Amino acid sequence: MVTFKDGFSSDSGEISVFLFRQSDGEFLGESVVYISQGCGLAPGQTLDNPPEVEHGCVAVRSGDLWQIVEDHRGTLYSTTNGAPVEYLTLGPLPENLTTVPRPTAHHRWNNIEWEIDVEATADDDRKKIVAEACRYLAETDWYVTRQMESGKAIPPDVIAGRKAARVKANG
């Protein structure tokens, strides 16, 4: 059995070590390594067991201790405009990002969740009504041209529909 004194092995042999990334300390896994007598562990290795972590967290080696750190890496969403953002940093969720995608363009972030912007929805609905009315008027303009050129009457239902469309387009 390999033992250590002052950081150096007293014997040669295989030992189980826990690996962590040197740049940020993130726990990477466990491995069996061979160590020669009188040598220490390689950088990024420790004999200390990392703590159990919940979903959304990772174990991070800081100095001689393990810490539990939030892990939100992956696709997050801007609370400003809902755009997806690829997030690569360990730690707490920044205030300008959320894990919840923006449901529609009419949702706004209220510092807790996405909520519907009633005014924007009403404005969009109004634009759709106006566009539909304009489309109907454009599609039936030929009746007006025909009447002007040939004197043939515009059908009453088309006259009523054009009148209603003008009200919608202007109202």
Image (cartoon, rainbow, N blue to C red):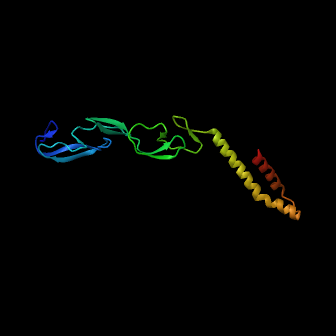
Q: Residue at x 64, y 42 (%)?
A: 121
Q: Quadrant of the C terminus?
A: top right
Of residues 7 and 97, the one drawn nearer to the viewer in this rendering: 7
Q: Residue at x 71, y 48 (%)?
A: 129
Q: Residue at x 75, y 48 (%)?
A: 169
Q: Which of the 4 image quarters holds residue 120?
A: top right
In the displayed structure, does residue 151 sit left or right of residue 76? right
Task: Residue 36: give x, y in percent of width and height.
Answer: 13, 46
Q: Residue at x 41, y 36 (%)?
A: 92
Of residues 91 and 128, the one drawn nearer to the viewer in this rendering: 91
Task: Residue 65: give x, y in percent of width and height.
Answer: 27, 34
Of residues 29 and 60, the one drawn nearer to the viewer in this rendering: 60
In the displayed structure, does residue 98 sit left or right of residue 41? right
Identify whether 85 is placed above or below 137. above
Q: Quadrant of the N terminus?
A: top left
Q: Which of the 4 image quarters holds residue 62?
A: top left
In the displayed structure, does residue 120 sit left or right of residue 31? right
Task: Residue 139: give x, y in percent of width and height.
Answer: 75, 58
Task: Residue 13: give x, y in percent of width and height.
Answer: 13, 46
Q: Which of the 4 image quarters holds residue 141?
A: bottom right
In the displayed structure, does residue 87 sit left or right of residue 8? right
- Residue furthest to the right in view is 151
